[in-house]
Structures are given as structure tokens and as C-alpha cells.
Image: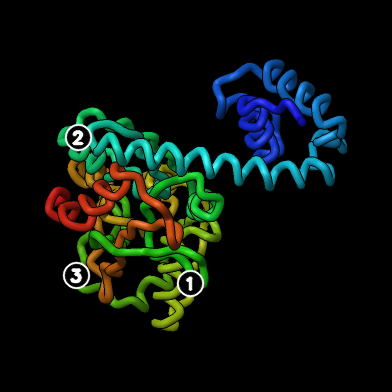
Amino acid sequence: MLHITLRQLKVFESVARHLSFSRAAEELFLTQPAVSIQIKQLEDTVALPLFEQMGKRIYLTEAGQELYQYSRAIAQQLADMELALDELKGLERGKLNISVVSTANYFAPHLLAKFCQRYQDVTVSLHVSNREIVLKQLADNLTDLAIMGQPPDGLDIVSESFMENPLVIIAPPNHPLCNMRQIPVKRLEQEVFLVREPGSGTRSAMERFFAEQQIKINRGMEADTTEAIKQAVQAGMGLGIMSLHTIELELETNRLNILDVQGFPIMRHWHIVHRKNKRFSNVAKTFKDFLLKEASGLML
């Protein structure tokens, strides 16, 4: 019988998932040498190499790929066991793993704070990433729930809208269009737009709207964060399109203006998303219900 420890499997699963010793060390709060030792001991136990290095990257060997499937299954069994025990304890305590897209991070902490005030023994682990990473976390069952815009079709997930998400056009306060009302959409062809990276939900909504209106826009800088777009718009590099929830501070301090353009705001919705057939802890189930019933009122 192989004498493999749960600690070794946990370390191996993290290294195999990230294909990185350093990222696994960060995730597990271990030093990189400690991770290497656990992997070496595991390889000695199974008497097979689990990773191979090519250049600066590591890859799973055939044995590593086989063990990775079993380690994932064991990790899921342990998680299910914890859920079952938590259900016996009730909602008095527990952990909530939640992933949000970067634009949702402007309001998600506010909602989490309200939830934690009500359930004070709940601990929250919040992961903020772009949409592609959040979808991968859902696919890999690494998070309980995710907050994002409309997810793409065809995935093995369940999505429910819980709050409106208006997309507006922003400009610096000294822009000539700030003094105009009911600006024709066609007028925007004369402007430069700063855009998010491919795969961004905001960018997809923007491109879909302008395609429907048969408008060709001039694209300027591309950036992978909302903050970068806001700073560039304030600097006069062009216009931007983003969620109203991300610019409240800039509007209050008169650093950005919303343009009054025909057809805007583009009304989208925020969604709470999870894997289909996901087994919820009491904490995750209660937080989902909290969002669906109360989020809109709390953000007024």
C-alpha cells in the first residue's frame, strides 16, 4: 500500500493545477523549498516522476496526469465532507469562497460587509480576476459563487441576475460633448474610445451595441483594468464605456462626466453564477439568497 499523506496530495494538486511551484507555494502559504520537498517525497513514494521540466516551464508526466485526476477527486470528497459537517453545525460559522470580475469589485465588498454584519462568524475569501479566470475557477470548482456580467452560453453553469448594471460613456469634464444633450450615436465616430482587453464583458457589450447601430469607432489604448481606462480618460486620451458602479467616486469629485448619448446607458445586469449541480454549503446558499433578495436595495 502506498503511504501518501493528504498534505502531499494537497501540495501536488496545487502545483499540478498551476504548473508552478512558486504559485502553489503562494496559494498554500508555504516556502518554495517546502513545496519541492513534498513533491520529492511523493515521487519517491510512487516511484515515478510526476513532473518534467522543459526550459523554464514544468509539465505533468503521464503518471502526474493520472495522479492529478485522483487528487482532484479526493479533494472534492474532502470538500463534500466539510460541507456535510458544516450543515450539521448550521450557519453560525463557515467559509464563503467567492470570485468576482474586476469591475464587480467596486461594489462586491460593500455587499459582503452587509452580509458579514448579519452573520458575524462567517469568513470570506474574495478572489478578484478578469472574466476568463473567473470562468475557469468555476469550471475547476475552485469557488462557491461568482459575480459577473452575463456569462457566455454553452457552459455547465447556472446564472441568475440580481442587480442592474448600466454601462455609460465617460469623458473628462472639459470635453466639448459634456455640454451637449441627446448626442446622436453617429457623432461618436469622431471620437477615440479606450477599450478593455478581448474577453472583457464590458468590451463585448460595447462592440455588440455599436455593431447593432452600424457605428465604426476609433479605438485608442487597450487596457486590462478599469482603473487604467479611468485614468486615461481623465488624462484626455479618449472616451470610455464602463459600469456606472465603477465611477461613483470620480463623479462625486468631478473628475469624470457621463455623456448624454442616445441609446445609453446600455442596460445590462450583474449575475450570481455557480456550477450546475453545485452542492452548496449553508453559507453559500444563504449568501446567494441574500444577493437575489436584497442586493438591489442595498446599492441604492
In this image, 286 relative to 19: left or right?
left
SS type, badge 3: loop
Give the residue type that dot 1 points to: Asp
Up-down relation of residue 278 to residue 187 (above or below): above
Separation of residues labelled 3 and 1 (CA atoms)? 37 Å
Separation of residues labelled 2 and 1 (CA atoms)? 34 Å
| Residue under label 2 | 119
Give the residue type that dot 3 points to: Arg
In this image, 188 relative to 300: left or right?
right
Would residue 87 be visible to someone looking at this image? Answer: yes
Residue at 24% over, 47% down: 286
Between marks 2 and 3 in the image, the one whose residue lies nearer the viewer? 2
| Residue under label 1 | 153
* Number of residues whose C-alpha sits closer than 10 Å to that of mark 2, classed few (under 14), some (14–19) or many (20 or more): some
Separation of residues labelled 2 and 3 (CA atoms)? 46 Å
* Number of residues whose C-alpha sits closer than 10 Å to that of mark 3, classed few (under 14), some (14–19) or many (20 or more): few
Quarter occupied by residue 32:
top right
Q: Identify the mark at residue 181; answer none if there is no mark.
A: 3
Quarter occupied by residue 44:
top right
In primary-sequence order, the first of circles 3 and 1 is 1
- Extreme residue toward the front, this view: 1
Residue at 53% over, 43% down: 77
Give the residue type that dot 2 points to: Tyr
Q: Are marks 3 and 1 in contact (CB under 8 Å)?
A: no
